[in-house]
Amino acid sequence: MSGRQYPEQSDSKPIQPDMPATDSTVATTDSAAAGGDAWERVTMRMRQDIGEAAWRNWIKPLRVSRLEDGTLTLEASSMLARERVTSQYADRLRVISAAEYGTVRKVEISLASHQAPRMSQQKRAPSTAGAAAGAPLGAGLDPRYTFANFVVGKPNELAFAVARRTAESATVAFNPLFLYGGVGLGKTHLMHAIAWHIREQDPSRNVVYLSAEKFMYRFVQALRFRDTMSFKEQFRSVDVLMIDDVQFISGKDSTQEEFFHTFNALVEDGRQVIVSADKSPTDLEGLEERLRSRLGWGMVADIHPADYELRLGILQAKAERARIAVPDKVLEFLAHRISSNVRELEGALTRIAAHASLVGREITIDSAAELLSDLLRASSRQVSIDEIQKRVAAHYDVRVAEMFSARRARNVARPRQVAMYLAKTLTSFSYPEIGRQFGGRDHTTVMHAVRTIEGLVGSDNRIAEDVQLLRSLIAS
Ligand code: ADP
Ligand code: MG
């Protein structure tokens, strides 16, 4: 119950022209998130084309507003600027944007929202008070992260289907929806896609996407300013709340508490809550038990690492969208050799494309291998501590969370020591780094574990066998 009123005007304070024009709203993208790199490249090419002075006057002040259905909407800060850009630079912008974004077919110049009448959904955005005044509640959305741009394969088909269903249903479908999977496998992409879809279908629904870190930051700020009431109010006026990477909420008790209450209030009130994490609810370490189980009540969908087919599909789709001619053989080679996350696949493709366009020669397997030697080497040898922890936990049939827990019972302490030993011998991480990745332990603890297991491998057959088996599983 809040007896306080938050005046509408605290939300409509004028936006500084040098801020991303859409920064004041939860409903649109900001320029940094809106395909930041691609836009950066577009403006850099424009600069070369039209010269520094014209660029500074007309192109530099433009802000990316959105990219939807192949139309890139840019915001000009004044009527004059809009007319000038439309009449003189729009064509060039379209051509360059088409090349850099891959998906752009049309460019539109609109007037920045602090110049134009404010959109209805901005009015709906909860006004913020105290510490948070003026700052947007949610974060921007990447215009490339749409369903249309998501390549579906076996490893992600469940997550994709569930995400689509959630986005399409007018009522709350699964609540909460919990998406989890390793780094770079498309969790953020799917969340943004849901947000884009809902906003397109029904702009009146208040969709807020933010990282768990940002959520925490806002909460801590609210605490500092003794303004947790308005913090709660803000979140409770949201129709769809998405919190990305909730593993970062772990640990901080008060934030967990607040998260739990905000979460319950929203779910009980029939709002859609969507959460992502790098682990399943049961494996999220450092999370309060009731929060952990609460998170798993709705729909839990995992994204598995991309298999060869999916990697190839993603590479083909990205090459096609970006209109880069890469021979099939080269794409297959990349799909074979870069087995880690999708972000690395993208990086490899971008590098190859940049090289090809500079050198103007056809890409071959050899040139690709040479160009990407660092990436290929890293991915063929890289073993992550995360993977070691998972394998070891599975082998000994203990929860992955025990790798980080403080419990000293032999049945969990021994597997933890084995995992530390393997981390030391199979990766290049230092003792302190390993300690950090095992729930913030001291480096001396890791050294002790390594020495203990080294000793046992020589004296205890079972441990020796375990280690050997695990080593071969992990290294393969
Ligand atoms: P996560 O949030 O799981 O770490 P992201 O959603 O940030 O991963 O994805 C990393 C990059 O890989 C993004 O650029 C995303 O667009 C891309 N990506 C991941 N999965 C797919 C997919 N199935 N199809 C197309 N792009 C993908
Ligand atoms: Mg992410």
Image (cartoon, grey):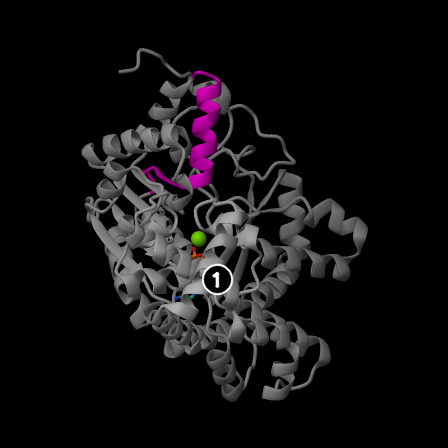
The reply, left or right, for residue 449 in relation to residue 63 is left
Residue type, mark 1 in image: Ala
Q: How many marks?
A: 1
Ligand number 1: quarter of image: bottom left
Residue 288 in percent (x, y) is at 30, 37
Query: Which sits in the foreground, 260 or 82?
Result: 260
**Residue that mark 1 sits on:** 423
The reply, left or right, for residue 269 in relation to residue 434 is left
Chain part drawn in magenta: 203-226
At 39% across and 65% down in the image, what residue appears? Answer: 150
Q: Is 218 one of the magenta-colored residues?
A: yes
Query: Which sits in the foreground, 446 or 289?
Result: 446
Residue 59 in percent (x, y) is at 68, 50
Q: Is 474 one of the magenta-colored residues?
A: no
Kindly give the residue lying farthest to the front in the view shown.
Answer: 459
Image quarter where the C terminus lies is bottom left
Residue 136 visible: yes
Callout 1 secondary element: helix
Image quarter where the N terminus lies is top left
